[in-house]
Image: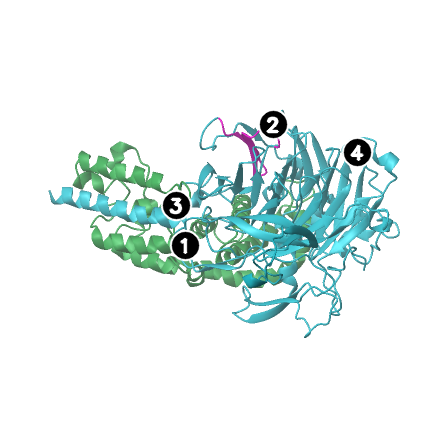
């Protein structure tokens, strides 16, 4: 899907260059002077432009966080306005974009990603717990659990240091062999649900049937203390 | 049992993993003490015979090529033609000291140039009050962060002067990661007449010493010495965007995109984090810190601005970590002006307290706003800087111009505010009369001491002669950095790699009226840091004046 988007971007950019010059279209689509159809089409090329900017920003060795955040937020706004216009075929499907944007944004912390990937790999050898990567993946390359066990770490490894590759190869292809049932799981399901020994993997779900409460408490303590550790008190500490 | 061991084992290795992660987050291992070896050099005050300075450097993004640079060519003969690299000369910050006697500029090449105002003299009435180069030194060098495999730019992001406490001057200069405290001292006397040493410093043959003499201080040519006294490193993971010295003269703060740290001026190996807006999940990042400043009188108060256009006033007495603001200043979005770019244009690029401490001035992409500290709901005044760009936001977004960060400034009496724009234009707004003026800082239009002509941008409609149309504005000529003398009507304007100094030359009787600024009688009194394309002598070091 992403590669399709890239292709379309080049064609559309040329076509829509004139559209870009007519800046009134970027104003509130609800403006009485603006016709219904043009804003949606114009938004699409603005969307592509924003995605292009996001790619470019992330390709920097150290992305400008302010620029990145503003582009992502603008992208989300465009995104939100495009959702009602689902009938237009050229528009890349909206649910993809925030995922792409979010994961791209999360992966912008390049150093963190790199260290994250190597840490996760180490952890996967030490621990058998498949949800172990989960807490670290809070700030991991994808910003969401990509799967429990070692198979997913191979994917994270790729994503870690070179976020550029992530974009070129296409996210979807990367995950084809990974069980993505976790995407569908409701991570913050109420306690009653999480005790069900279901096939769905989540942060606490796999732990519950296997470990007793004491171990669960201990694990939660670890998670809490490490969250505190991540707040740097200053140099030299 | 196995499950228990597994859990404990996982706990410990998780902890170990987290500990190393925490150290990674804190940045590269710090060097104790004063930080890295001092990198400054002392430069003698430039004289007509100033020595050519050259050095080689690996340019960022140039594929590792080395270029030779020439800086400050004096009027003397050149040994070989200079290869000028304009990007390193781009001025990145301008700041007057507290008396206005000194003006510091920082550039993309990590260099700091300090100008000093000449005392008015009867002998040369034309050069009264003009600024001349006082000192130049290399503050920051490009560095390499080995942990992240990233080069750290040497560009000076901000300079802030410390209040003067003795004969020496001191300033803080920062790049993206490291803040340095520089001490500037003058030496204009030299002891002569030592008993054991001769004039060259060699030990005398004692048999030739027949009488004792008392060494006396003899005047010598003024020498300005600069030395780095402190290096505050490894305090920031993200890029530092502002520094601000506290009114207590003991502490200062530095802000990056997500955190603000409080430092003590004498302590370099630790700082206190006072604001942290980094979300637990970076995926949720939606807002960054764009600027911050201490209140000029209340040492416990500071403000920081965000990319969403909000200002947060924080009180350090309330808590060690000031994540909870004491006051939040935010103007609700105007529904009639809503667009996809609303957030970007509302991002505050600069915030400045008024000298009185009662107001704050903010700059976003299209406006400058004055806020009253007592009113959080909306600004008390809003001035349009270049509203004609509102219809061009998409092209400006495409060209990334919409992300340009303009600074703003108060005059000494808080009655006039100033900010830069495109096409080398800068704008002034008189808060009392509500008049405003657009002026241009450029070599062509400014002969020394000629009065600046007000400019006008026409956005369609009636067009007068000399008006500039919106479409012919040069967006590569941006005035991002401006500064106003703390007491007088003297302003410093940085236009790419040129520095302009303008003075309001209305007769002194009018000027002495409190709050008076003509807005129409600005004339140029100095220009520097300019490279003539033909390679001839620059407009920089010329003795006393900056005449072209």
Query: Callout 1: 10 Å neighbours few (<14), some, many (20+)?
Result: many
**Residue drawn where x is 81% and y is 32% of the image:** B433
Q: Which residue is mark 1?
A: A111
Q: Which chain is green?
A: A
Count all numbered tags in the image, as a single digit: 4
Q: Secondary structure at mark 3?
A: loop
Tell me: residue B205, above or below residue B380.
below
- Residue B53, by quadrant, is bottom right
- Quarter holding the C terminus of chain A? top left
Tell me: residue B89, above or below residue B324.
below
Q: Which residue is mark 4?
A: B434
User: What chain is tagged by disc 4?
Assistant: B
Question: What is the span of residues highlighted in magenta in the rendered image?
Answer: B296-317
Question: Is residue B318 found left or right of A237 in the rendered image?
Answer: right
Q: CA distance from mark 4 to mark 1?
A: 50 Å
Question: Is residue A164 found left or right of A119 in the rendered image?
Answer: right
**Residue occupying the far bottom of the picture:** B80
- Between A144 and A38, which is closer to the camera in this rendering? A144
- Between B134 and A91, which is closer to the camera in this rendering? B134
Q: CA distance from mark 4 to mark 3?
A: 51 Å
Q: Position of residue B156 (x, y in %)?
A: 59, 52
Foreground mark, 4 or 3, reads 3
Q: Position of residue B170 (x, y in %)?
A: 60, 45
Q: Which residue is mark 2?
A: B376
Q: Are marks 2 and 4 in contact (CB under 8 Å)?
A: no
Q: CA distance from mark 2 to mark 4?
A: 23 Å
Which label is found at residue A236? Answer: 3
Query: Callout 3: 10 Å neighbours few (<14), some, many (20+)?
Result: some
């Amino acid at each position: 899907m992403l590669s399709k988007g890239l292709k379309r971007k080049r064609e559309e950019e040329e076509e829509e260059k004139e559209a870009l010059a007519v800046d009134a279209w970027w104003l509130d689509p609800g403006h009485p002077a603006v016709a219904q159809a043009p804003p949606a089409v114009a938004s699409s090329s603005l969307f592509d432009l924003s995605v292009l900017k996001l790619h470019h920003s992330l390709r920097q060795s150290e992305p400008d966080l302010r620029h990145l955040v503003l582009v992502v937020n603008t992208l989300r706004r465009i995104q939100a306005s495009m959702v009602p216009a689902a009938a237009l075929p050229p528009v890349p499907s909206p649910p993809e974009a925030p995922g792409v944007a979010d994961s791209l944004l999360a992966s912008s912390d390049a150093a963190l990603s790199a260290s994250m990937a190597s840490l996760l790999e180490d952890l996967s050898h030490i621990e058998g717990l498949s949800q172990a990567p989960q807490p670290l993946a809070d700030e991991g390359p994808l910003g969401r659990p990509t799967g429990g066990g070692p198979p997913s770490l191979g994917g994270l490894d790729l994503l870690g240091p070179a976020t550029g590759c992530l974009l070129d190869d296409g996210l979807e292809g990367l995950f084809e062999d990974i069980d993505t049932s976790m995407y569908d799981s409701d991570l913050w399901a109420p306690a009653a649900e999480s005790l069900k020994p279901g096939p769905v993997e989540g942060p606490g779900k796999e732990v519950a049937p296997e470990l007793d409460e004491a171990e669960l408490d201990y694990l939660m303590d670890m998670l809490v203390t490490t969250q505190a550790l991540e707040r740097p008190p200053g140099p030299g500490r | 049992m196995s499950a228990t061991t597994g859990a404990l084992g996982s706990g410990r290795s998780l902890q170990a993993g987290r500990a190393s992660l925490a150290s990674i987050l804190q940045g590269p291992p710090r060097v104790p003490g004063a930080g890295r070896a001092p990198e400054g050099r002392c430069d003698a005050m430039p004289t007509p015979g100033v020595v050519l300075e050259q050095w080689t450097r690996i340019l960022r993004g140039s594929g590792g090529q080395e270029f030779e640079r020439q800086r400050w060519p004096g009027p003397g003969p050149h040994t070989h033609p200079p290869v000028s690299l304009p990007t390193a000369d781009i001025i990145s910050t301008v700041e007057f000291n507290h008396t206005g006697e000194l003006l510091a500029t920082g550039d993309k090449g990590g260099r700091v140039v300090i100008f000093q105002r000449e005392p008015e003299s009867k002998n040369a009435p034309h050069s009264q009050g003009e600024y001349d180069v006082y000192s130049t030194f290399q503050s920051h060098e490009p560095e390499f962060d080995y942990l992240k495999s990233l080069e750290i730019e040497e560009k000076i992001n901000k300079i802030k002067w410390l209040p003067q406490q003795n004969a020496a001057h001191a300033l803080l200069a920062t790049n993206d990661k490291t803040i340095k405290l520089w001490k500037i001292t003058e030496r204009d006397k030299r002891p002569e007449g030592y008993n054991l040493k001769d004039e060259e410093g060699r030990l005398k043959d004692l048999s030739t010493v027949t009488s004792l003499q008392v060494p006396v201080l003899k005047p010598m040519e003024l020498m300005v010495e600069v030395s780095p006294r402190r290096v505050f490193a490894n305090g920031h993971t993200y890029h530092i965007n502002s520094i601000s010295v506290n009114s207590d003269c003991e502490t200062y703060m530095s802000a990056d995109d997500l955190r603000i740290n409080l430092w003590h001026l004498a302590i370099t190996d630790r700082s206190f984090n006072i604001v942290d807006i980094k979300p637990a999940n970076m995926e949720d990042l939606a807002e960054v810190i764009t600027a911050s400043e201490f209140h000029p009188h209340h040492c416990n108060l500071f403000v920081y601005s965000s990319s969403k256009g909000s200002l947060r006033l924080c009180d350090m007495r309330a808590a060690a970590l000031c994540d909870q603001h004491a006051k939040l200043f935010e103007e609700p979005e105007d529904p009639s002006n809503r667009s996809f770019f609303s957030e970007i244009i509302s991002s505050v690029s600069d915030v400045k307290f008024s000298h009185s401490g009662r107001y704050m001035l903010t700059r976003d992409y299209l406006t400058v706003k004055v806020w009253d500290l007592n009113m959080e709901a909306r600004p008390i005044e809003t001035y349009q800087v270049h509203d004609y760009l509102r219809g061009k936001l998409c092209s400006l977004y495409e060209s990334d111009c919409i992300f340009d960060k303009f600074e703003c400034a108060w005059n000494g009496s808080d009655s006039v505010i100033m900010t830069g724009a495109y096409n080398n234009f800068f704008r002034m707004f008189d808060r009392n009369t509500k008049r405003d003026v657009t002026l241009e800082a450029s070599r062509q239009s400014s002969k020394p001491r000629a009065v600046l002509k007000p400019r006008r941008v026409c956005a369609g409609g009636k067009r007068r002669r000399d008006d500039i149309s919106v479409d012919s504005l040069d967006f590569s000529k941006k005035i991002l950095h401006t500064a106003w003398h703390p007491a007088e009507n003297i302003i410093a304007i940085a236009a790419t790699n040129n520095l302009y100094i303008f003075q309001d030359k209305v007769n002194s009787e009018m000027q002495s009226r409190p709050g008076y600024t003509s807005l129409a009688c600005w004339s140029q009194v100095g220009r520097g840091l300019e490279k003539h394309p033909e390679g001839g002598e620059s407009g920089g070091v010329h003795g006393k004046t900056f005449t072209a």
